[in-house]
Image (cartoon, rainbow, N blue to C red):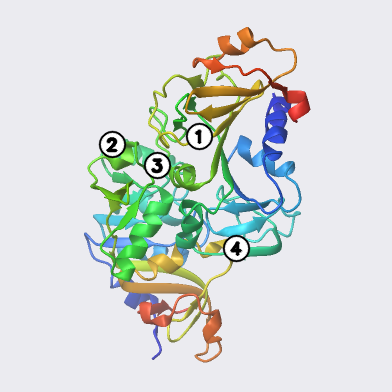
């Protein structure tokens, strides 16, 4: 299970190049930080660009935390700012990408990840991030805990954003969201097109050349 | 010019039915001592505006537990199950906003701006009941300003003029909240002499600040 998540994180980390500033959501997206190249900088919406790993025990500082209230270390070149500036960065298109988890994602690039029936949470900064970041990468295990597809024709839960997702990365495939639909960019080694389609509730487009995830990663 | 006042004088500010705006983010950078004074005041029927509702009975979450808040405008309540229960039981009327939209609405309130045009939330439940305005072929939602009767702010340092310096990610909503209150009250970890802060290092100019809670 954790291998699955690490695989996804490794694939996504390769999307980014030095100089990019990226916002990683809570949960699976956080793992991407372990694999990014030096020079890719991380934005946290509570007001900082340039954070690194969890600080060693004893060096935690209550004035340097992430959006999940976790302690962060501050790298050389970091900048802190207020929430207004933070979301000017987000909405203004200054982030190369945001990486977020999903409850559901669909072939139009709609994302639902903030509201579950019977549980009150709130959207936090997710709606702003999907609206403003240049690239919106959804990372998710391909199916939910019941084995049902999370990639659908149409989302059924309340949306975080409409037509905002650019890429979907699961342990089985990397999908590009295009005007024509979901194009398979890469697939797990040994997986057939039929098997992948059977686990996906939206029509997949298989181009002539598809990378193997082992190679992509 | 000294704006430092005693706790009792701050407590006397709070009245039933007020709107109170509070800085902080996920239990960091909240004005915890001012929240204590608000809880002790017993003022009820409050509208709270803050990023989130804290943990159960911690930071802003104290105002959920105390039953003082009856309306709440914020972006996230997931850390505080008591909020979910209060909303389900009809004790708190909750209005969720995208976080950047909340920040911009507060900034508008403080800056005398009549609203902002944002694309965030188009095609979601956020657009319900809001005016859509097209500018150069791009559609936006009109988001209206937020102000408060009293704004509560946490700073790293304050001088007697009310000039404020924040530190790290504890800054978050505080500089915005500090502009949007009819009365702005600050708690600072350190109150420094007037003249000891370099004008260029000040994040919030003292003109926005009315009172500073005395440090014991």
Q: Quadrant of residue A191?
A: top right
Residue A134, visible in the rendered structure: yes
Q: Where in the figure is residue A131, as x and y percent of width and height?
A: 45, 44
Q: On what subunit does the disc labeled 3 rest?
A: B
| Callout 1 crowding tier (Cα within 10 Å): few <14, some 14–19, many ≥20 | many
* Relative to B118, residue B33 above or below: below
Front: mark 3 or 1 = 1
Q: Quadrant of residue B113?
A: bottom left
- Quadrant where the C terminus of chain A sits is top right
Q: Which mark is residue A63?
A: 4
Residue to which mark 2 is pinned = B89
Q: Which mark is residue B82?
A: 3
Q: Are marks 4 and 2 on the same chain?
A: no
Whole-number angstrom distance, CA of label 4 to CA of label 2: 35 Å
Whole-number angstrom distance, CA of label 4 to CA of label 3: 26 Å
Query: Tag 4 or tag 1, which sits nearer the N-term?
Result: 4
Q: Where in the figure is residue B46, as x and y percent of width and height?
A: 27, 56
| Callout 4 crowding tier (Cα within 10 Å): few <14, some 14–19, many ≥20 | some
**Dot 3 and dot 2 residues touching (CB under 8 Å):** no
**Dot 1 and dot 4 residues touching (CB under 8 Å):** no
Residue to which mark 1 is pinned = A165
């Amino acid at each position: 299970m954790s291998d699955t998540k690490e695989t996804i994180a490794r694939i996504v980390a390769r999307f980014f190049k030095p100089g990019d500033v990226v916002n990683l959501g809570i949960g699976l997206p956080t793992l991407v930080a372990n694999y990014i190249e030096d020079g890719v900088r991380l934005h946290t919406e509570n007001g900082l660009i340039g954070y690194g790993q969890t600080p060693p025990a004893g060096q935690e500082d209550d004035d340097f935390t992430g959006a999940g209230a976790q302690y962060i270390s501050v790298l050389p070149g970091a900048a802190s700012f207020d929430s207004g500036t933070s979301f000017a960065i987000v909405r203004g298109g200054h982030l190369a990408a945001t990486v977020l988890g999903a409850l559901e994602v669909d072939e139009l690039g709609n994302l639902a990840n903030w509201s579950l029936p019977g549980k009150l949470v709130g959207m936090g900064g997710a709606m702003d991030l999907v609206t403003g970041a240049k690239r919106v990468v959804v990372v998710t295990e391909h199916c939910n805990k019941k084995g049902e597809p999370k990639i659908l024709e149409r989302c059924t839960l309340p949306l975080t954003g409409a037509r905002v997702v650019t890429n979907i990365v699961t342990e089985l495939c990397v999908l590009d969201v295009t005007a024509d639909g979901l194009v398979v960019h890469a697939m797990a080694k040994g997986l057939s097109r039929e098997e992948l389609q059977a686990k996906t509730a939206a029509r997949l487009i298989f181009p002539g050349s598809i990378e193997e995830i082992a190679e992509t990663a | 010019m000294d704006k430092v006042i005693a706790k009792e004088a701050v407590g006397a500010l709070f009245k039933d039915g007020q709107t109170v705006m509070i800085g902080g983010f996920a239990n960091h950078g909240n004005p915890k001592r001012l929240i204590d004074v608000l809880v002790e005041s017993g003022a009820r029927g409050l509208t709270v505006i803050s990023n989130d509702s804290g943990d159960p009975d911690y930071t802003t979450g104290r105002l959920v537990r105390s039953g003082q808040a009856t309306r709440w405008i914020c972006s996230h309540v997931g850390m505080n199950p008591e909020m979910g229960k209060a909303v389900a039981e009809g004790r708190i009327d909750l209005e969720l906003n995208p976080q950047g939209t909340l920040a911009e609405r507060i900034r508008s309130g403080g800056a005398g701006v009549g609203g902002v045009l944002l694309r965030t939330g188009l095609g979601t439940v956020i657009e319900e009941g809001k005016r859509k305005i097209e500018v150069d072929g791009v559609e936006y939602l009109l988001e209206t300003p937020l102000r408060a009767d009293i704004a509560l702010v946490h700073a790293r340092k304050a001088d007697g003029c009310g000039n404020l310096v924040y530190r790290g990610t504890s800054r978050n909503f505080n500089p915005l909240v500090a502009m949007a209150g009819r009365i702005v009250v600050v708690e600072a970890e350190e109150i420094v002499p007037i003249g000891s802060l370099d004008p260029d290092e000040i994040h919030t100019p003292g003109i926005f600040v009315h009172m500073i809670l005395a440090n014991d």
